[in-house]
Amino acid sequence: MEELVRASDPAVRRVDSYRHDKERILARLRRMEGQVRGVQRMVEEDRYCVDILTQLSSIIAAARSIGLLLLEDHIRGCVLQAEDKEAAIQELSDAIERFTRSVS
């Protein structure tokens, strides 16, 4: 089982490839966080299943949108600038495969 990596861990890779979208990404993540709390309340209140599914669909669409933005930023900021282009392309290909599997 994979352990969560702590932000203070010196082994954590840091980049600025999404710097220009960072505030937009954070704002969307905060909205998603609120949506998730809303869905929790809906479940606690025994709300109608279809209403909950509609909200979950919205959360999934938001996550997909953020992921696509991060992929684009990664291509522009990391892949195109990589010294080892083949390794960067392979890493990107693996990331796309994982991402598309999780959001499809």
Image: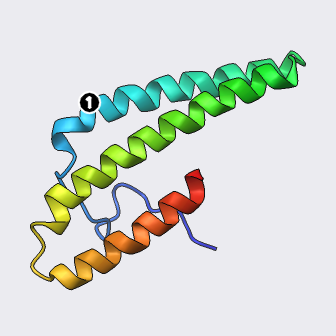
With respect to residue 15, does 90 lie above or below? below
Q: Is residue 52 left or right of residue 6?
A: right
| Image position of 41 (left or right of 64) | right
User: Could you classify mark 1 by the number of other residues whose Cα lies within 10 Å: few (under 14), some (14-19), or many (20 or more)?
Assistant: few
Image x and y of residue 87, in percent: 25, 83
Question: Which image quadrant for residue 65?
Answer: top left
Give the residue number, with chain letter if any, for mark 1: 23
Q: Position of residue 71 (x, y in %)?
A: 32, 54
Query: Where does the image place residue 63, in percent across and percent down from the top left?
Result: 49, 40
Residue located 82% across and 24% down the image: 50
Secondary structure found at label 1: helix
The residue positioned 40% from the left and 40% from the top of the image is 66
Front residue of 83/13: it is: 83
The quarter holding residue 76 reads bottom left
- Give the residue type at disc 1: Glu
Relative to 32, say whether 72 is above or below.
Answer: below
Q: Compared to 69, does 14 lie above or below? A: below
